[in-house]
Image (tube, rainbow, N blue to C red):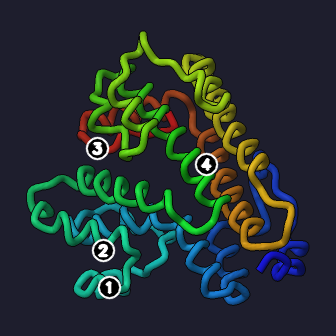
Amino acid sequence: MRQGYYYLITSLPELNLTDKNPVYDLLRFREFIWDELTPHDKELFSVLFYLYDIENLVKLIKETNTRWHPFGNFSQEDLTNILKMPDGLPEFLQNFIADTRKLWERASAKKLINLATTYFIGWSQHVPNAFLKKWLYFDQNLKNLLIWLNCHKFGLNPEEEVLGNHYEAQYLRSVKPDAIDLHAWDFQFREVLRHYDNPDIALRESIINEMRWHYLGEISSTTFGIERLLAYAIKLQLINRNFTDTELSGQQRLGALLDSVTKNYRVPENF
């Protein structure tokens, strides 16, 4: 459906990365467009929210007190029921459950989230949409690079934190800080290295979010298919991330990072 969403797309207000009060938040936008999407496009759109489903699933598995992500595709009741018969889950989560169930009792929540995310990364490289596949690949590599930098800055092990089995992830797990070479990578990744040590943390995060925003513009479609709606949803995610990053002080983010390290929880990729 290349032109099928013309009226829907042209009705949407323009977005800017610095917006603080967009007309739609991510949940309202999904509700607004959902009934208009074809079944195939609903499946594609759902891909943007599977990382929230991963954390929600692990919350159920480990019975943690972490908050339930409302952006996930499944309600808590639905996911609880599906967990008993996981045929209703996407393939990567079915495989994760089948392959790791024996580990659930002794593995930490962080370990299970990382494992499930690794399954998602491999699966996402084969989604049947070129735009979505490019975006997910770029964003995961950017996350991994930031995680790699944080690991070496704070004395953590990148072999445990960098996720995925693709070439870039394997490279980051093995390379030392004095030997890293990103000349074959897109320029955005080299820019991350240039700005990473900027003492103005809020400015640094804003620059990195702008990199995401500009890359999204480079690969976005000018037609009126599902790609435009996917890009709009991603922009809403970036606006929320940018607003959160710039509202928090550098000291708050540093405290959150150090707290996460002392608790052996996930390394924030956007510090």
Amino acid type shown at disc 1: Asp
Do the CB atoms of the residues marked 3 and 2 lie less than 8 Å apart?
Answer: no
In the shown orientation, is residue 97 left or right of residue 223?
Answer: left
Amino acid type shown at disc 2: Gln
Earlier-in-chain disc, 3 versus 2: 2
Crowd band around label 2 with a 10 angstrom C-alpha radius: few (<14), some (14–19), many (20+): some
Amino acid type shown at disc 3: Tyr
Indicate the secondary structure of the residue bearing disc 2.
Answer: helix
Q: Which residue is mark 4?
A: 241
Residue 33 figure quarter: bottom right
| Label 4 – label 3 distance at C-alpha | 20 Å
Q: Position of residue 5 (x, y in %)?
A: 82, 79
| Label 1 – label 4 distance at C-alpha | 33 Å
The structure residue drawn at horizontal position 32% and vertical position 85%, both measured from the top left corner, is: 87
The disc at residue 265 is 3
- Quadrant of the snapshot with the N terminus: bottom right
Q: Position of residue 159 (x, y in %)?
A: 28, 33
Amino acid type shown at disc 4: Arg
Q: Which residue is mark 1?
A: 87
Please, is residue 90 above or below residue 243 in the view? below
Between residue 118 and residue 49, name the one nearer to us. Answer: 118
| Label 4 – label 2 distance at C-alpha | 29 Å
Indicate the secondary structure of the residue bearing disc 4.
Answer: helix
Residue 113 figure quarter: bottom left
Indicate the secondary structure of the residue bearing disc 1.
Answer: helix
The structure residue drawn at horizontal position 19% and vertical position 65%, both measured from the top left corner, is: 99
Q: Position of residue 265 (x, y in %)?
A: 28, 44
The disc at residue 94 is 2
Crowd band around label 1 with a 10 angstrom C-alpha radius: few (<14), some (14–19), many (20+): few
Between residue 87 and residue 129, name the one nearer to us. Answer: 129
